[in-house]
């Protein structure tokens, strides 16, 4: 698909290539780590704004907090919980592997261990958050 | 500096003493700090107190102790700088046009500065009503 010039343009990558550049579990973790990080940054920005509203007094602040009490906010809360737990545990694995390069040889085992720890914490916590939506 | 091949691999700390090198180190140090500050904050607020029970008086109660203000400021600072540096790395990976990259990074830094200022302002100037 060369147009005869030497100018390099990034070639179109099919959706399949997005998940298979290096492929496997390691790249999936890398992508999720970035996605979770960006999501947390977005929530952090919102959270700074809502806390800043404290300055407008009790009634304004309490009224605007109703925003977080809607049923859909609980669903978003579960996403936030997953994102923070994933980013924290996966980040810890990356740090361990960076400072002890030998452990990269066991990356797959560490990822599986990480996911077990993640879901042991996440699943009961998510259930606790969502329970009121089901009349609990 | 030739250190030879590393067994296994890893994200080698880039360069030595340059900006990227310190950014690399900062992400790991702040990551460990946030592992405690952010995860504790989230678990405490969502499972011990509960989002539905948080209101103006909850914050008044917390911030009547200056140590919680320092805690919250540390959390704000580490989280925001860690997050914006992460955003910088993502932008540098995906935005190919230099002009657009500079523009997007500038917007990100200005927004981050405003958010950090707003957060720090409310944490340290909020006075508990009598």
Image (spheres, rainbow, N blue to C red):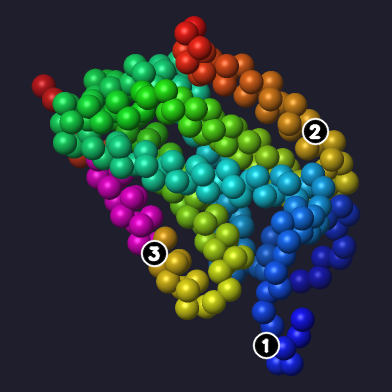
Q: SS class of the residue under badge 3?
A: helix
Q: Nearer the viewer, residue B127 or A58?
A: A58
| Residue A88 appears in the rendering | no
Establish whether labels 1 and 2 are both on one chain.
Answer: yes
Residue at left offset 49%, top offset 7%: A136
Residue at left offset 78%, top offset 47%: A26
Magenta-colored stretch includes residue B116: yes
Furthest residue in direction top, as rendered: A136
Residue extent of the magenta highlight: B109-122
Furthest residue in direction left, as rendered: B130
Is label 1 in contact with label 2 (beta carbons under 8 Å)? no
Say whether residue A42 is left or right of residue A15.
Answer: left
Viewport quadrant of the N terminus of chain A? bottom right
Q: Residues within 10 Å of mark 3 (few under 14, many from 20)?
A: few
| Residue B4 appears in the rendering | yes
Which quadrant would residue B19 be assigned to in this image? bottom right
Q: SS class of the residue under badge 2?
A: helix
Label 1 to label 2, Cα distance in Å?
43 Å
Q: Nearer the viewer, residue B41 or B87?
A: B87
Pointer 1 chain: A
Count of numbered labels shown in the rendering: 3
Vertical placement of B42 versus A96: above or below? above
The residue to which callout 2 is attached is A112
Residue B48 - label: none
The residue to which callout 1 is attached is A7
Which quadrant would residue A117 be assigned to in this image? top right
């Amino acid at each position: 698909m060369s147009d005869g010039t030497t100018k390099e343009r990034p070639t179109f990558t099919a959706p399949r290539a997005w998940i298979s550049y290096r492929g496997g579990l390691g790249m999936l973790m890398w992508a999720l780590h970035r996605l979770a990080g960006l999501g947390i940054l977005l929530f952090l920005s919102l959270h700074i704004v809502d806390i800043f509203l404290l300055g407008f007094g009790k009634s304004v602040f309490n009224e605007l907090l109703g925003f977080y009490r809607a049923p859909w906010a609980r669903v978003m809360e579960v996403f936030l919980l997953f994102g923070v737990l994933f980013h924290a545990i996966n980040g810890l694995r990356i740090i361990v592997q960076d400072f002890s390069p030998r452990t990269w040889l066991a990356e797959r085992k560490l990822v599986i261990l990480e996911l077990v720890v993640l879901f042991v914490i996440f699943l009961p916590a998510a259930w606790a958050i969502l329970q009121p939506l089901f009349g609990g | 500096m030739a250190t030879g091949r590393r067994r296994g691999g890893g994200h080698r700390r880039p360069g030595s003493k340059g900006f990227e090198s310190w950014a690399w180190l900062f992400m790991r140090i702040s990551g460990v700090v946030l592992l405690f500050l952010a995860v504790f904050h989230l678990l405490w607020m969502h499972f011990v107190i509960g989002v539905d029970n948080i209101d103006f008086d909850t914050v008044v109660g917390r911030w009547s102790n200056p140590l919680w203000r320092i805690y919250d400021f540390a959390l704000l600072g580490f989280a925001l700088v860690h997050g914006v540096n992460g955003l910088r790395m993502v932008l540098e990976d995906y935005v190919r046009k230099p002009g657009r990259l500079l523009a997007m990074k500038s917007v990100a830094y200005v927004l981050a500065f405003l958010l950090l200022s707003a957060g720090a302002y409310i944490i340290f100037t909020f006075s508990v009503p009598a």
